[in-house]
Image: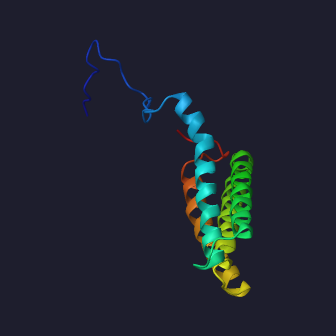
Amino acid sequence: MAHAAPAPGRPRRTSRTSTTPDLFSERTHRIARWALPVVTGLVYGYWVAANNRSGGEITGWNLLLGFASAVVFMALWIAVRAIAPLMKRELHALLWAAFAGAAFGFLYSQAGNTALRSTGMALAVGATVFAILFYRYYTHEDAEGHRVS
């Protein structure tokens, strides 16, 4: 069977070298790396405080709970983001799932739900996050655990 010869003047492609273009500068990525946990933490803290007061008046203890929750959420997010990529894909997904499940469980418990129901909901959210992230990491890494670009 005959095959066409490469045309002169055109480079022959043996592998895919193009990747998705990066639309933002390195400075924008650095800012977003810190802005995302801070903004999300503040929203989370506000949400915890709002669930805790159940539509009642805002008190000093309520504000303290909101700001403390925001600071802890931010610190844990930054810690998980720093530690998780160093782990294998199973532990990487498990760490993010534990963080998401615990954060949701605490938020859910502040609405006045029982500890058993809050734990069940946290486990359901954590299991869902684990399944999604494990699939993503499994399909985007090679056999040795290196990211495939």
Q: Is 38 displayed left or right of 95 in the figure?
A: left
* Residue 122 placement (x, y as % from top left): 66, 75
Residue under the point 72% across and 67% down: 60
Seen at 59% across and 47% down, the residue is 141
Q: At x 56% / y 60%, what residue is drawn?
A: 135
Residue at 43%, 36% in the rendered image: 20
Residue 58 figure quarter: bottom right
Q: Residue 28: x and y, percent?
A: 53, 33
In the rendered image, the residue lying farthest to the top is 9
The scheme the figure's colours follow is rainbow
Q: Position of residue 114 (x, y in %)?
A: 70, 87
From the viewer's side, name the closer residue of 119 and 14: 119
Tell me if residue 57 comes above or below residue 39 in the rendering: below
Q: Image height check: is 16 above or below 55?
A: above
Please give the count of numbered marks on the rendered protein.
0
Q: Picture quarter containing residue 97?
A: bottom right
